[in-house]
Every structure is written in structure tokens, then in C-alpha cells.
Image: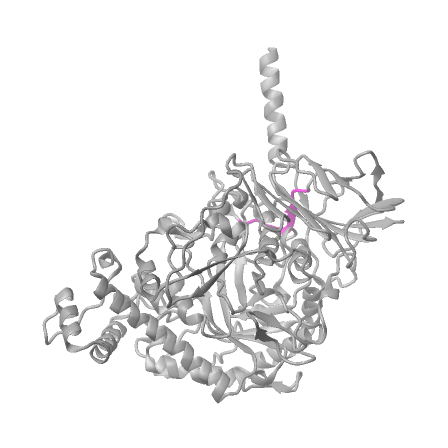
């Protein structure tokens, strides 16, 4: 073979080896309670609510003694919210070991057994006693271990004939309709009252008086303003049992138009109403038609802003009505959140202007959420992802998107976020967001979702796009993230970039093009959200002057604390580094970018990975007797198969899960007085795999070979 061809072949071989290491089976074991080597439950205070309720003070969540409380949480969805009596203690203990201090109970309003609503009736107006008992017992088990509860009210309720709801089969989740239909409003109040006044015999309190309940959420990803600008208020739906995001039926469109015209007659002077009718082309005896999305651009400002104000008032009235019911009529003590700012392809400010009047502001986002399509041949519902790394796109990152929603003077939580499976760069998600959330001084993160099905059905495979419980990359990172965010190890930003909006700007932001995402504030330098904290000062005042575009290197963004740096992204070789006294990370294309931190350096063969080294005590890494090293790359199910574009799975495969082990050498630097350093690989139950490996001391520091045996986390001990 000619020398040139030999060189090309060798380069191709090396390139392939850098793209992906050999994969190895690595199942997580949630039933094995013996593993203590990565236990971070010391971050929790048990029982939850022992001294009283979590409250809001000076814009943050606080404990009764005034100390900050940061939520490091997960969602539990549907049937996963109600484990059996045997499994509930195991699940609670498992969550505690990973530092989870709050569980968001999602889709409780499904029919039993998935949810709480009695399935043996022709209505949805009664709660199932058996499912309530299971929920009660589980919440009590969580409380024992210092884990709080977030109760979601209206999420996925589907109505029945006996509910007395018009066109009940055409509503789906009734998004948008829940804000204005009198019968739906009545049923929501009834459900909230039933659940919140329910007495839990295991905690010996009603949920409205239970200090282990930290948050009550009104609706999930539901906004009538969003329904308007997404063209879901047209009245065209005639499909029974439609999907989540659906147009409304004709009868509700007529009702909404009637409400709009009654509102116009009440709000506008005769001259302005006549002017609006002329703009809309409506005769004096005809109702004023509502705008469709395709009419927004050409609509006169007066017409557009008037109608936008109508939807915003409906939204605010709903939030205030539910707040009054929960806080005043029922006397509930937990904090109340309205809904999340979740649609980052459009402005969230109209929603936030109303939601921020309640106790907590909340946001949702996903890095490259699957786009679902029906296969024309198999008719199978398939989720497609772009499958590109976030480290190469900082200005559209989960950090940038979520940062737009925080409001000054209000706690800010993120109740849903994930890098959905099977994204091949998902190991970047948890450590990056945990670090920057601490920089922004947010109050909580809930990863979506720990699981969807009852624990009795949990297997060692990843069953869907969002389940993190069986994920051997995300679960070790969950423990690491608790140390980063809830301890926390990252200092808050030295500077907060504030902005405010006029009422006109808030409404006009609806018409801004998608190119203005994620901030929908023309001229705002999104880069600032990776350097400083950001907050909104208000929604009905003068617009503040936008900050000047930050300076610095085009390919390097450094936080104003100096602890976080995002670099290499213009060359599509992005790396995020984190350097604090107790936690240090290298995340991204670590084989081509090899930054050296004060206590951590690495020579890695993998093309892409995330390394995080952390002290398991209050001591800095330089003095810590025990450390946790998470070393993560790709994961998947056995025999899973990608399509040709690596955008979707042809086959999801089955158990067990596998990992691409991170292979190479980790160097621990500047360990004061260290005489011996040992590392032991941990299995899926956080128990040792084999014997500890002694690190080799060199001029560079203490060198530890990693990758064999295959694992995603290591316990490191230092003898002095």
C-alpha cells in the first residue's frame, strides 16, 4: 500500500477512535440501597418542612430561619407519582442519595391508575381513594428524607360526558379554554379544593396546611395569549380526542368572540369602538372579528394592541381568581406559581406580566426538543432531533433561553428542562445548566422527568425521550449537579443586567419575528446572559436603555466571577469550563481543547465528554479527603439503531443500557499534603467495581487512568 494511503487510513482510524469509544453495558440499579460512595443526601434537611413553610423573601426562596433554599428537583409523571407501598421508601431513599430535595408531581389529573381521577365514573369530578392513598404514603416517605413536594393542578385533564362540558370530546387538554369557559373554571376550582383539602393520614395534615408542600402550580404550559398567536383560537377543530396542542371547537370560538365584544363595549369609549370596527371591517350590528396570526403584521397598532390586551386581562384574571381561591378561601400556605414561560420561539412577556404577580416565576425549555411526525409508511409517531451539541451554540442554549424569564423581586424556578434522549451530546446538559443557574442565582431546577410508569415497571433501559431514572449518564450527573447548584459551589454573578418594558413593548413583542429569539428584545446582547445575571424590572414602565454589546474575545465568553468560561464555539469545538474551590469541570470537545484547571486536567481520547471533579465535604478540592469524579459521554439501549441522518431511532433497543466510557488520564493537581491517592470505579448502584487503583504521582500531579473498568463515576480518596 502506498505511504500516502497508509497515512490516510491511519488518520481515518484515529478519527473514528476519537468519534466514539467502544460501548459497554452499564445499568443503573435503583433497588440496591447499599451504595454510599456517591451519596449526597447530606445536602438535605429531614424531615422536609420541619421548621415550617418555604417562603419568598427578597426575591428568593427561603427556609423559616431565613436561609436560602434552592430546589434541586425532578418531575415524576403520571403513574410514576404513586409507587406501591413496598417501592415508595426505596424511591424516596434513592432520590435523596442523588441530592433531590423536591419532586414535582406532574399529570396527577389523569384517570386512575395513571392519575388521581376516578376512572369508574362518567365524569372527572371525583378522586380515586386507592390512588390518593398511594400518593399520600409516597409524599410522607419523601418528607421523611427531606424531599419537598410541588403539586401541579391542571395539566392533562380530559373531560367526560357527565362533566357538563360543551363538546368535551373535542377539547384535548383544553389549553386556552381553561382561562375563560365558566364550566371549566368551575371544575378547576372544584378539583383544586378537593386535592388541597385532602387529609394525608401519614403526614397528619391537609395538603393546604402541609409544610412539606413547597409549591402549588395552577396550569402547565397553558396560556391563552400563546393560543392566540399560535392560531389555536380559530374554532376549526372537529377531531375527537385531539392532541395536546389543538385548535378549539367552534362553540368556544363563538363564546370567546362574544366575550371579546362584551369586553370592548365595556372598555372602549364609543368613538374608539367605532374606530376599531372600521379597522376590522365590522358593521355596526356585527361582532368585531378577532385577529388571526396571518393578520398580525398588517393589523393597525390600535386593533392589535386592543385585542392583545383582552387576552392578557383574561390571563391575569384567571391567575388572580385561582390565587384568591387557594390562598384566601382555602387558606393554603404553600407558594403558588401560575404557569411557565415555555415557548421560546415567541415572546413570553405578555404571560410573564401576569404570572409574575404570583409567588414564583417559572420557565421551561429543552435543548432540541423532539419534533414529532407520523411516518407515512408505518404510521408510527417518530421524534426527530437535530442532534448537535449545545456547546457550539451558546446564544441559543438552555441557559440563554431560560435567562430571559427571571423577574426582579421574585423567586425563579425552572420546572422542566432536559437534553432529550437519544441526543449524543446530552452529557453536557446537567452540568452546564446547574453551573449557570447558580451564576444567575435562580431558585430551583426540576429535571423532566425521572419516570413515567410505576416503579414496578422500571427496567434497565431508557424508554422514551425524557426519562432520566435509567440513564447512566444523567443520574451520576444529578448527584454532581446537586453539589454545584444546591450547595452551591458557584458564586452568584457580580453584576445583574436589568431591563424593563413598557406595556406597549410587551404587546408588540408578540409580533416580533422568530429571528429575535430567545429574548425578543431587539438590540439586547444575549451574550450578556452568559457573563452576568439578568432580571426584568417591570412590564408597565418606561423601557430601560439596553446594555452595550459586551466586549471580549469573539470565541470566549467568561462569567464576571471568572469561574465559568464558554469557548471554542465559533470553530465548532466548544468547551465549557468551570473552576471553583470545590467543583471543577471540563465539558465538550475535550480531546481537541485541553484547558488546565487549578486542580483538574485531563488527556481524553473521546471526541466529546463531560468531566466534573467535586469535593464531597465542605473542604476545597486541594484539601478534600474524598472526591466524586463524574466522567460521562454517550449512552443508549442495547441494539438501538439510528436512522441514516442520526436524527431519530429506527429501533429503541432494550435492556441493558450501555455507556461509552470516557477513556484517558485524569490529573489531580495541587493536592496539599497528599501522600496517596486512590480511585475506585463505581457501578450502577454506586458500589465499587473491583479494587481501588492507586494514582501515579508525576510532575503534573496525581495521574489516574480512567475508562477500564467502564463506568460514569469514580470515588476518589486522598490520604495525608
Quadrant assignment, res 295: bottom left
Which residue corresponds to the image point at 44% horizontal and 61% vertical from the top-left? 342
Left or right: 224 in relation to 65: left
Query: Would residue 650 be counted in the magenta stretch?
Result: no
Is residue 188 among what the camera can see? no
Where does residue 237 sit, x and y in percent of width and height? 28, 66
Left or right: 173 in relation to 686: left
Of 141 and 150, nearer the camera is 150
Residue that extends furthest to the top in the rendered view of this protein: 2
Where does residue 455 sit, x and y in percent of width and height? 63, 66
Q: Image height check: is 625 above or below 16?
A: below
Majority secondary structure of magenta residues: strand
Q: Tag count in the figure?
A: 0
Quadrant assignment, res 158: bottom left
Is residue 333 among what the camera can see? yes
Of 193 and 376, nearer the camera is 193
Where does residue 573 sit, x and y in percent of width and height? 56, 36
Which residue corresponds to the image point at 35% horizontal and 70% vertical from the top-left? 176
Quadrant assignment, res 38: bottom right
Left or right: 197 in relation to 664: left
Where does residue 44 sit, x and y in percent of width and height? 71, 68
Query: Would residue 658 be counted in the magenta stretch?
Result: yes
Which residue corresponds to the image point at 82% horizontal and 47% vertical from the top-left? 690
Q: Image height check: is 389 above or below 500?
A: above
Left or right: 36 in relation to 545: right
* Quarter of the image with the N terminus in it: top right
Which contiguous range is marked in magenta?
652-661
- Display colour scheme: one colour
Of 396 and 206, nearer the camera is 396
Of 135 and 702, nearer the camera is 702
Amino acid at each position: 500500500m502506498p505511504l500516502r494511503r497508509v497515512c490516510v487510513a491511519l488518520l481515518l482510524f484515529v478519527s473514528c477512535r476519537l468519534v466514539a469509544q467502544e460501548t459497554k453495558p452499564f445499568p443503573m440499579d435503583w433497588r440496591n440501597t447499599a451504595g454510599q460512595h456517591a451519596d449526597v443526601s447530606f445536602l438535605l434537611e429531614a424531615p422536609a418542612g420541619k421548621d415550617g413553610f418555604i417562603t419568598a423573601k427578597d426575591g428568593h426562596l427561603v427556609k423559616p430561619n431565613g436561609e436560602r433554599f434552592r430546589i434541586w428537583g425532578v418531575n415524576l409523571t403520571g403513574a410514576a407519582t404513586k409507587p406501591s407501598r413496598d417501592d415508595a421508601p426505596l424511591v424516596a431513599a434513592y432520590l435523596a442519595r442523588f441530592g433531590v430535595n423536591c419532586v414535582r408531581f406532574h399529570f396527577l389529573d389523569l384517570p386512575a391508575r395513571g392519575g388521581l381521577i376516578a376512572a369508574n365514573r362518567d365524569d372527572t369530578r371525583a378522586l380515586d381513594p386507592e390512588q390518593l392513598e398511594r400518593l399520600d404514603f409516597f409524599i410522607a416517605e419523601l418528607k421523611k428524607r427531606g424531599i419537598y413536594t410541588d403539586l401541579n393542578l391542571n395539566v392533562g385533564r380530559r373531560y367526560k360526558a357527565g362533566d357538563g362540558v360543551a363538546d368535551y370530546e373535542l377539547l384535548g387538554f383544553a389549553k386556552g379554554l381553561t382561562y375563560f369557559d365558566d364550566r371549566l373554571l368551575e371544575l378547576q376550582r372544584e378539583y383544586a379544593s378537593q386535592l388541597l383539602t385532602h387529609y394525608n393520614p401519614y403526614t397528619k395534615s391537609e395538603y393546604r396546611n402541609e409544610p412539606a408542600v413547597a409549591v402549588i402550580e395552577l396550569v402547565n404550559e397553558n396560556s391563552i395569549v400563546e393560543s392566540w398567536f399560535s392560531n389555536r383560537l380559530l374554532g376549526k377543530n372537529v377531531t375527537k380526542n385531539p392532541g395536546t396542542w389543538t385548535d378549539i371547537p367552534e362553540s368556544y370560538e363563538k363564546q370567546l368572540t362574544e366575550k371579546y365584544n362584551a369586553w370592548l363595549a365595556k372598555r372602549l369609549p364609543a368613538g374608539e369602538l367605532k374606530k376599531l370596527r372600521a379597522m376590522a371591517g365590522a358593521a355596526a350590528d356585527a361582532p368585531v372579528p378577532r385577529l388571526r396570526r396571518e393578520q398580525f403584521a398588517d393589523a393597525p397598532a390600535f386593533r392589535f394592541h386592543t385585542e392583545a390586551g383582552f387576552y392578557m386581562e383574561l390571563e391575569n384574571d384567571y391567575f388572580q381568581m385561582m390565587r384568591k381561591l387557594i390562598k384566601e378561601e382555602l387558606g393554603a400556605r404553600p407558594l403558588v406559581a401560575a404557569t411557565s414561560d415555555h415557548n421560546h420561539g415567541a415572546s413570553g412577556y405578555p404571560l410573564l406580566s401576569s404570572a409574575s404577580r404570583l409567588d414564583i416565576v417559572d420557565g421551561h425549555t429543552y435543548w432540541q426538543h423532539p419534533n414529532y411526525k407520523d411516518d407515512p409508511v408505518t404510521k408510527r409517531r417518530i421524534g426527530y432531533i437535530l442532534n448537535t451539541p449545545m456547546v457550539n451554540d451558546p446564544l441559543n442554549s438552555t441557559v440563554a433561553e431560560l435567562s430571559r424569564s427571571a423577574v426582579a423581586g421574585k423567586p425563579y424556578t425552572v420546572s422542566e428542562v432536559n437534553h432529550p434522549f437519544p441526543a449524543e451530546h446530552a452529557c453536557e446538559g446537567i452540568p452546564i445548566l446547574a453551573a449557570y443557574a447558580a451564576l444567575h442565582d435562580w431558585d430551583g431546577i426540576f429535571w423532566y422527568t425521572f419516570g413515567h410508569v410505576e416503579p414496578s415497571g422500571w427496567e434497565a433501559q431508557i424508554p422514551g425521550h425524557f426519562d432520566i431514572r435509567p440513564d447512566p449518564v444523567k443520574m451520576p450527573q444529578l448527584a454532581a449537579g446537586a453539589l454545584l447548584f444546591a450547595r452551591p459551589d458557584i458564586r452568584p454573578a457580580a453584576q445583574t443586567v436589568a431591563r424593563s418594558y413598557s406595556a406597549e413593548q410587551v404587546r408588540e413583542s408578540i409580533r416580533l419575528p422568530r429571528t429575535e429569539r430567545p429574548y425578543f428584545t431587539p438590540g439586547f446582547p444575549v451574550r450578556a446572559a452568559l457573563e452576568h445575571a439578568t432580571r426584568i424590572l417591570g412590564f408597565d414602565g418606561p423601557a430601560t436603555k439596553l446594555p452595550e454589546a459586551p466586549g471580549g474575545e469573539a470565541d470566549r465568553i467568561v462569567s464576571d466571577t471568572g469561574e465559568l468560561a464558554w469557548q471554542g464555539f465559533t470553530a465548532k469545538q466548544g468547551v465549557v469550563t468551570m473552576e471553583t474551590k470545590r467543583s471543577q469541570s471540563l465539558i465538550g470537545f475535550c480531546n481537541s481543547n485541553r484547558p488546565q484547571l487549578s486542580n483538574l486536567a485531563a488527556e481524553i481520547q473521546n471526541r466529546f465528554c463531560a468531566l466534573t471533579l467535586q469535593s464531597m465535604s465542605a473542604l476545597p478540592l486541594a484539601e478534600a479527603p474524598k472526591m466524586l469524579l463524574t466522567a460521562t459521554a454517550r449512552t443508549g439501549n442495547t441494539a438501538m439503531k439510528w436512522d441514516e441522518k442520526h436524527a431519530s431511532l429506527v429501533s429503541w433497543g432494550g435492556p441493558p443500557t450501555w455507556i461509552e466510557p470516557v477513556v484517558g488520564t485524569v490529573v489531580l493537581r495541587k493536592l496539599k499534603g497528599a501522600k496517596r491517592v486512590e480511585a475506585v470505579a463505581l457501578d450502577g448502584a454506586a458500589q465499587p467495581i473491583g479494587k481501588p487503583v492507586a494514582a501515579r504521582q508525576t510532575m503534573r500531579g496525581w495521574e489516574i487512568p480512567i475508562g477500564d473498568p467502564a463506568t460514569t463515576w469514580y470515588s476518589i480518596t486522598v490520604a495525608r
